[in-house]
Image (spheres, helix red, strand yellow):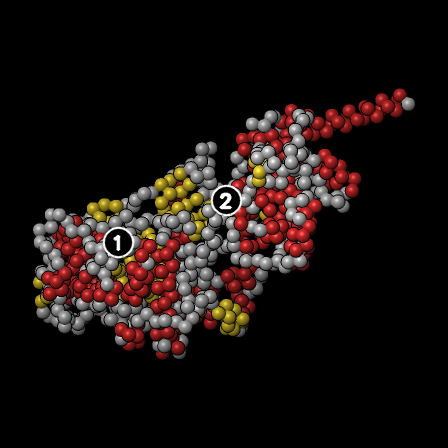
Amino acid sequence: MKKTVRIFWRLFFVGLGCFVLLILMANFGVFGKMPSLTELENPSMLQSSEVYAEDGTLMGKYYRENGNRSVVKYNDISRYVIEGLIATEDKRFYAHPGIDLKGTMRALFTLGSQGGGSTITQQLAKALLDQGSKNKAFRVIEKLKEWIIAVKLERNFTKEEIITLYLNTVPYSDNVFGIRNASRTFFQKEPDRLNVEESALLVGMINGPGLYNPRRNPKAALDRRNVVLSRMEENNKISSAEYAKLKVQPIQLNYRKMDENNGYAPYFREILRDEVKDVLKGFKKSNGDSWDIYKDGLKIYTTINPRMQEYAEEAVAAHVPTLQKALLAQYMLKSGSVWKTHENVLEAAMKQSDRWKNMEEDGLSDKEIKASFYVKTPMKVFAWNAKREKDTVMTPFDSIRYTHEMVQTAFMVTDPITGQVKAWVGGISFKTFKYDHVNLKTKRQVGSTIKPLLYTQAMEERGFTPETEVEDVQQNFGNNQLVPATSRTCSGRTMTMANALAFSKNCASAYIMKQVGPQQFADFLTRLNIPTKVEPFPSIALGACDLSLFEMCWGYSIFAGRGFSTKPFFINRIEDRNGNVIARFDYSPNRKEAVSEATAYTMARMMQGPVDKGTAAGLRNRLGAAEMGGKTGTTNDNADAWFMGYTPQLLGGVWVGCDDRFIRNDGAGGFGGAAARPIWELFFQKVYADKTLGIDRDARFAKPADLKTEVNSADLMNLIDNQATPDEDPGVKEQDYEIIQHNDYIGPESTPVIEEKPVKKDTIRKVNNDGDLKPIGAPAEEPKKKKGLLKRLFGNKQ
């Protein structure tokens, strides 16, 4: 008997020693690196970066699929989520030290038939370690590591911190991570507003995100929700009557999963992504690592005004369908003859498509892939309706041609003084057309919108004034360089510079170019800080050069900006996940005086001519603005139409055209000067009507104190001939391009990410009988903890 006892105790102590040795080996990283206490105190779980508008509106996020998290505080989580989680997953959460021996033994003896033995803390440890091996031997080692981390978590975090970290970390259905994103995705509300049944549904998902997906497996999800409710009832978190009432209710979702197409200003956010990456290259974390926009939970505060963004998108949606109708009415597009000499464009687009690449990866030959592009297929394509899409049946090849025949646009609005970007519309639909037409790299021929910059240089450096007489005659720049190429539109007479600008007279502009000089004008554009190098050809007097809308807004900032060239900017500041400022931009990073304030003011007043009497006649009067300036622009082949305009408070630029320059409106005068202007006009109608924006119709340009010659509207308008004919083709009849009212309201592309949060946040803690605050889900009195071997081994609570 004594020998048997000795053998028993010998085996027991050997086993215990081996077990302790395994724990020590695991703790010191023999089976893989273990996080330090510092790393546990500052867990680096993936967290999406969030983009905010100037008023704090959430615009969207940047994330990789498993990094789409928004961290939420304990006090911002509904009490029902916490109570449901504890009741279902770990009812002794407030009693155990991270490892529930009773639960573990029960799981061992019942082989898991009555539930697993992992505590919430152990599940969190598993998530932080990113473990879950299918190999049983490896899983045993992983379990040991999870026990060690669980104990460390308990020693370094409060119970509230542990449960918050857990809810922020674990996955929910549809590959959504974190309680905040789950709440937003499935119910379109913040997690502190979840009711009992919604909380139970989300808690139920945690145990099996795929199995209990309410969209794909509604019956299983309903049953699991009711299990959570029943556990809450068993633990006296809801009454029997509440449980009976709630368990028969169907699941009610308000589902919208966030992706790159959701939120405000999707084109802008795509450009912002690259800009933020460039900015962050100059900053490092405290440990020397680089910042990662996809996982570091950055908060990016922008200059975008959500109201103005919506108005800009509404203006585009209200007018471009009219242009599209006019374009498609042309014979060359209706017959398809426009493609006879451009089949290579469609061929290239076909081979660059996802369909081609996917079929190529599947091993199909080029011949087989090409044949599939001529088979009619059900599909969704872009359409001008509320959803910006329609169901149809067409061949993939025809769908490529269809998308290439869409009229595109770009619209940007800035503050001309500060350079802050207020609205950015990069195209007609980001979901279908990802290509942004606003940014610095997208350039189109600018046409007559270049003329005010030429006139500015003539005024600044050659002493020209609005009254200066200029010759409306074709100019020869030597070597038979005639500008314009034809003298058809030249009147042959002299006129004031104000008159020449109002009616966009090409020959008069060529005359001014001859006085200034092509090289000097190209140098002047460089001095305005416009990045694109413009070659000094005489024809640039008429806009025969390619610039981006971004650059045009940059150049035009001198007029309302008192002579300062101000680069548009759109980032106010970038913060880390804890609110520490990484970078701040309170003003444009590139602002310099380019011309005198007197020249800028005189030009701003002279540019009232086009919007009063010239190529955009009546615009100022229709809007009821005290002062504004503007200029239309078209190219000779009508492939591009522009309108640049500004008031003392806002500067806006619009471009209209097709991505393929050979697709243009050749019928009845082309796109013309009236193609782009209505978008600008409708936007300003809405902005002026919205008094909350503070944009004043009566605002006036700041008059320089040292202005030698008084400039007033009456005198300027007297310099403009009422009978003059614009050189710039005005397009089809004005009424044909007026803003139309669609039966189907299209509305803005931007959509709110989430409804507003309530101001009151008192749903988390409760008061016990003694008047003390207790954590939600905690027992009446939290048991005192005894220091055991593991606790003594792995440290005391900080």
For residue 672, above or below residue 589: below
539 or 110, nearer to the observer: 110
Residue indicated by mark 1: 649
Residue indicated by mark 2: 761
Label 2 Cα crowd, 10 Å radius (few <14 / some 14-19 / many 20+)? some
| Mark 1 / mark 2, whichever is N-terminal | 1
For residue 190, above or below residue 153: below
Give the label, 1 or 2, closer to the camera. Answer: 2
Q: Is label 2 in a helix, a strand or a loop?
A: loop
Residue 246: image quadrant is bottom right
**Residue name at image x 67 percent, y 40 percent:** 91
Question: In the picture, which quadrant includes the N terminus?
Answer: top right
**Residue name at image x 21 percent, y 68 percent:** 617
For residue 648, above or below residue 331: above
Q: Are marks 1 and 2 in contact (CB under 8 Å)?
A: no
**Residue name at image x 31 percent, y 64 percent:** 682
Task: Measuring from the top left, give residue 510's x and y in whole percent.
Answer: 16, 63
242 or 62, nearer to the observer: 242
286 or 762, nearer to the observer: 762
Viewer can see residue 478: no
In the image, taking residue 237 as reference, residue 522 lies left or right, namely left
751 or 277, nearer to the observer: 751
Question: In the picture, which quadrant includes the C terminus?
Answer: top right
What distance separates the C-alpha of mark 1 from that of mark 2?
Answer: 38 Å
- Residue type at numbered disc 1: Gln
